[in-house]
Structure formats: C-alpha cells, structure tokens
Amino acid sequence: MKKKETILRNIKNSYKLNDQDAIYFFDCVKGYIKAIKENRMICSIEHASKSGMSRYLNFKYIEKAKYNAKRYNLINTNFLFKTLGYRFNKTHFAFYVGGCGMDMVFHTNYSNIHDFYRIGFLTKKECEKLSQNTPTII
C-alpha cells in the first residue's frame, strides 16, 4: 500500500471528492478490502431482469462492533459503490450491474479490486489474489 497522503490525493483526483469524503472513502475501501481478505463479504442479488442482461446487487459485510465485543454490525457499501460510479436503484435498494454470460458478482469484485490497485491500496500480488475472491452470494 502506498502512503495515505498519496492515496488520498489519488482519490481526490480520480473521484473529485472533498477532504472529508475522501477520508471516508479511504476507510470504506480499507473495510471492503479487509472483508474480502477474510471472506466476510456478502452479495445479495436483489433483482434480475427477465432477459438476464442485468441485475441489482447489494454488497455488505459483517464486522465486530468497536465498543461491544459481543455485537456485530452489518456494513453496507453504498457510499463506496456510488463513488465508484455504479448506478443506484431506490426501488430495489441496490446497484445496477449489466452484462450476461459470466458471474457478475465476480466481475464486480474483480473490477473494484483492480480500481483499488490503481489508486494505490494494494500491491500487484494482493490485487491478483483478492480479485479472485468471489463474495458469498445470497
């Protein structure tokens, strides 16, 4: 991983975020990567079109609560996906992903991990490994 300042500069340049949003994005990406590493990422397919050409996906992960070791929090990735440019659908409360003929959950994670590599969050070796980890589908 590159220095935090370099990554924040890359985030601001790539996604045109202000300082607070860039820091929040930084934390969201770190949580996403950690959840993928630990196989805690869950993807629910909220809706698939009749033709099968598109679907609405919702990525979430579980993490331990910071102040109570007996509790867990379900973290959604909405801010992260909106920042990455995915189209949000309020009816299905999920993100639109188009395409067919392949595992779109795998493709979405693969694309996200490679985006994080380009920003500077991951090394080439980590990128190659994590891009192959498909989230659990429910």
Image (cartoon, grey):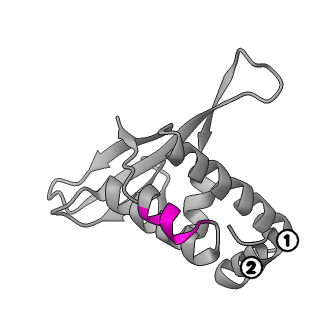
116 horizontally vs 70: left or right: left
Confirm whether residue 86 shows in the render. Answer: no
Residue farthest toward the top in the current orientation of the protein: 70
Residue 14 drawn in magenta: no
- Answer with left or right where residue 77 lies relative to residue 95: right
Residue 125 part of the magenta-drawn span = yes
Residue 72 vs 133, above or below: the answer is: above
Return the x and y of residue 34 as percentages of the image width and height.
Answer: 60, 47
Q: Which residues are magenta?
A: 122-128
- Residue 87 higher or lower than 64, as above or below: below
Label pair 2/1, CB-CB below 8 angstroms = yes
Which quadrant: the C terminus?
top left
Q: Which residue is mark 2?
A: 12
Task: Give the residue displayed 83% in from the left and 25% down from the top.
Answer: 67
Instruction: Give amino acid for label 2.
Output: Lys
Q: Which quadrant of the rendered structure holds the N terminus?
A: bottom right
Give how far across and how far down residue 103 sits, in percent: 25, 56
Residue at 74 percent of width and 79 percent of height: 12
Residue 19 got which mark?
1
- Quarter occupied by residue 52: bottom left
Residue 111 lies in quadrant: bottom left
Does dot 2 land on a helix, a strand or a loop?
helix
Disc 1 residue type (three-letter): Asp
- The majority secondary structure of the magenta stretch comes to helix
- Badge 1 element: helix
Q: Is residue 9 visible?
A: yes
Distance in Å between CA atoms under marks 2 and 1: 8 Å
- Farthest-out residue, front: 125
